[in-house]
Amino acid sequence: MPQPGTLVLAALACFALGALLFLTAGALALTTAVRRWRHRSQYRDTLVRLERASRPIVTAQDQTVAALLRPCCERWWASAGADHDTDHCTQKGHQA
């Protein structure tokens, strides 16, 4: 018959081994989750950079041409700075 001290030591060793295995499994799960999160974050950042790079570059000249081509009854050179007549303007939502 084993002595009671030996059984206590065996129980403590099993408990310590179980706790070590539990902590190791938890650390492994946490490491895996962090790696997946980082990978997903890098993937999302790469997609955002690619989407931004694929946008056409709008220059000041493009903006000026677009402003001049808007359908409106008065051009800036025709009105010579006069108040804009909103009653006869064909551009929707145009403000004076």
Image: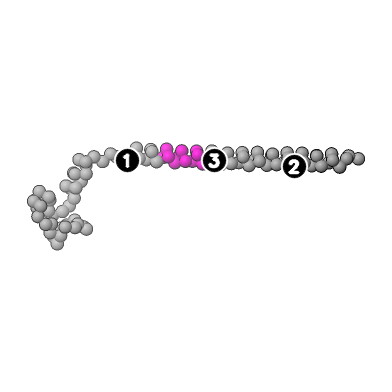
Residue on which disc 3 sits: 34
How many numbered callouts? 3
Image depth: mark 3 or mark 2 in front: 2
The amino acid at mark 3 is Val
Image spot of residue 8 (x, y percent):
81, 42
Q: Is residue 79 above or below residue 26?
A: below
Residue occupying image coordinates x 77% and y 39%: 13
On screen, residue 90 versus residue 23, left or right, reads: left
Disc number for residue 15: 2
**How far, Cα to Cα, is label 3 from label 2?**
28 Å
- Count neighbours of disc 2 (C-alpha within 10 A) and say few if under 14, some if 14 to 19, many if 20 or more: few
On screen, residue 46 versus residue 69, left or right, reads: right
Label whose residue precedes the other's in the sequence (3 or 1): 3
Q: Mark 3 falls on what kind of element?
A: helix
Disc number for residue 55: 1
**How far, Cα to Cα, is label 3 from label 1?**
32 Å
The amino acid at mark 2 is Phe
Q: Mark 2 falls on what kind of element?
A: helix
Magenta-tinted stretch: 37-47
The one of 88 and 81 positioned closer to us in this rendering: 81
Magenta stretch: helix, strand or loop mostly = helix
Q: Is residue 40 magenta?
A: yes
Image spot of residue 52 (x, y percent):
35, 40
Q: Residue furthest front?
A: 5
The amino acid at mark 1 is Arg
The one of 72 and 33 positioned closer to us in this rendering: 33
Residue occupying image coordinates x 29% and y 40%: 56
Q: Mark 1 falls on what kind of element?
A: loop
Image spot of residue 38 (x, y percent):
50, 39
- Quadrant where the C terminus sits is bottom left
Q: Is residue 36 magenta?
A: no
